[in-house]
Amino acid sequence: MVMSVLEEMRIRSLGVIDDAVVELSPGFTAVTGETGAGKTMVVTSLGLLLGGRADPALVRIGAKNAVVEGRISVPDGASAVVRAEEAGAELDDGVLLISRTVSAEGRSRAHLGGRSVPVGLLAELADDLVAVHGQTDQQGLLKLSRQRQALDRYAGDAVAVPLAKYAGAYRRLRAISTELDEITTRARERAQEADMLRFGLDEIAAVEPRQGEDVELAAEAERLGHAEALASAATAAHAALAGNPEDPEGIDATTLVAGAHRALEAVRSHDAALGALAGRIGEIGILLGDVAGELAGYADDLDADPLRLAAVEERRAALTALTRKYGEDVGAVLTWAEQGVARLLELDGDDDRLGELTAERDALRAELGGLAQALTDARTEAAERFAAAVTAELASLAMPHARVSFEIRQTEDPEGVEVGGRPVSYGPAGVDEVELLLAPHPGAPPRPIAKGASGGELSRVMLAVEVVFAGTDLVPTYLFDEVDAGVGGKAAVEIGRRLAKLAKSAQVVVVTHLPQVAAFADRQLLVEKTNDGSVTRSGVKVLEGEERVRELSRMLAGQEDSETARAHAEELLATARADR
């Protein structure tokens, strides 16, 4: 099976590192060096590449920013490739290029396959590419939620399938419970809202407004209020056009136009142009006659009834009272009424809805109890297998008498769901509290690892868990930062051996100070400072042959040239080669 491999990292202006390249390879790579040389910067750099928090304090003093670049070979079809391509990233012959820049002011930028991307996307890719473990991760294993997650991860579909069904029912139950709470706790507010809606709807119904009625009445009121002026204007205009019966000698427009038309008609046969003008004047005469007739009719029909004006103003006042409360015009008032009817039906239906929701909630609680029981059964079965596998690994890590087990328990809660005939607390992941227990030697009672495991024991439990996971839920690359802390001697040798075993199915990078661990690595990298206290490009190098023996001798005795240390280093390397 083709796996993703972290091939190389280039680190610039990060901590003590000025400019260095870390060349990695498949299998087991050990990163060593004296205390303070910058080994942990390897872990920090990878954390930045994988979306970790950008700390401006990491930027080397005097530099504007720190830059970390990485090359990861990714097989076609891998989920990381799909996510990267969706973000517009391009692969370089199957290699994904990642970079992260952190400025001294705290700004951070991320690039993936030549494309600027959100830092959060790098964190998403991290889930599929690299598992990073350090001292803080060991502390994370002490949390009960992390222990449950580890068990669920090991169980695979046996837990994932019932957990998905449980989670769906749980979300539905939460939604129904929230709606029930809203209906019951806001009953008074909803009753007040219903009363206000009824009052408003009654008020509107009493007036019975029509769409556009306010506009029509405004126009009528304007006309009625100026009836005398309008009638006078219409009469004067009619007289100007058609003449005043009381002044038969007066000259009007119709008479003048008719005279002009007669004058042209007499000679139109002699000139076509003049004939055309005569026709146009005739049309004007006809138009003047039509307008004069309409003016006469307008003046006759104009209603100057003050009673009608009073009725119009009264109606407008009633409509205005509605628009002040329910909308800017009658159309908005009618819309409010339509929406109010729908909302009132909803509020009046709360009692029926309350009964429906209560019945559905009770049914879901019963269903959730059954799903929770199935989930507990699946976890219990997986816990036995998981504990046996981790116990077997601990035997290979110089803890031959240690025993790991899981306690799966529930907490009684009168408000919980019924499981096994009793009400218990429940949450989005079920009803189980999962706790990892360790009995380090015969006769010792199993105790929570948070209380019963030393730092070295916790490191080995964590490594054992990862080795077990390697056979069931493979992560392409594992990075361990001093996972061997607190151990030594035979236990350190066994940790090196188990890391080498893990490296047969994944890429393993370990930052270590133990020669027993480093000896089992397929490749050993040395991080060393220059005289000015920085790590340069030449400060991270691959150790081969005599150089590797010298570094292991230094790690063993602090003396590179000690013959005893050299002999021990060569023996360690020979033992490791024989195991591989």
Image (tube, rainbow, N blue to C red):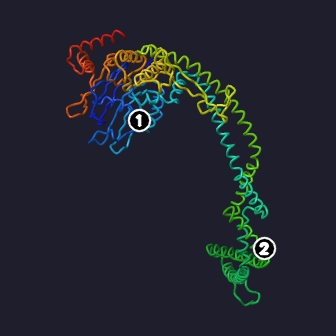
Q: Mark 1 or 2 closer to N-term?
A: 1
Given residues 261 and 46, the one toward you in this image is 46
Q: Which mark is residue 71?
A: none
Report the mark closest to the observer, 1 or 2: 1
Which quarter of the rendered picture does the C terminus lie within? top left
Q: Which residue is mark 1?
A: 52
Q: Which mark is residue 311?
A: 2
Residue that extends furthest to the top in the rendered view of this protein: 578
Which quarter of the picture shows residue 523?
A: top left
For mark 1, does the 10 Å Cα neighbourhood hold few (<14), some (14 to 19), or many (20 or more) residues? some
Q: Amino acid at mark 1?
A: Gly
Q: Amino acid at mark 2?
A: Ala
Q: Gap in Å between the C-alphas at discs 1 and 2? A: 77 Å
Q: Is residue 571 left or right of residue 293?
A: left
Q: Is residue 426 left or right of residue 289?
A: left
**Picture coordinates of residue 416, whole percent (x, y):** 66, 34
Q: Is residue 358 left or right of residue 392?
A: right
Residue appearing at x 76%, y 47% in the figure:
349
The image shows residue 356, relative to residue 444, as above or below, that is below
Please say whether residue 325 is visible from this viewpoint. yes
**Picture coordinates of residue 362, whole percent (x, y):** 72, 35
The image shows residue 205, relative to residue 122, as above or below, that is below
Which quarter of the rendered picture does the N terminus lie within? top left
Residue appearing at x 67%, y 35% in the figure:
414
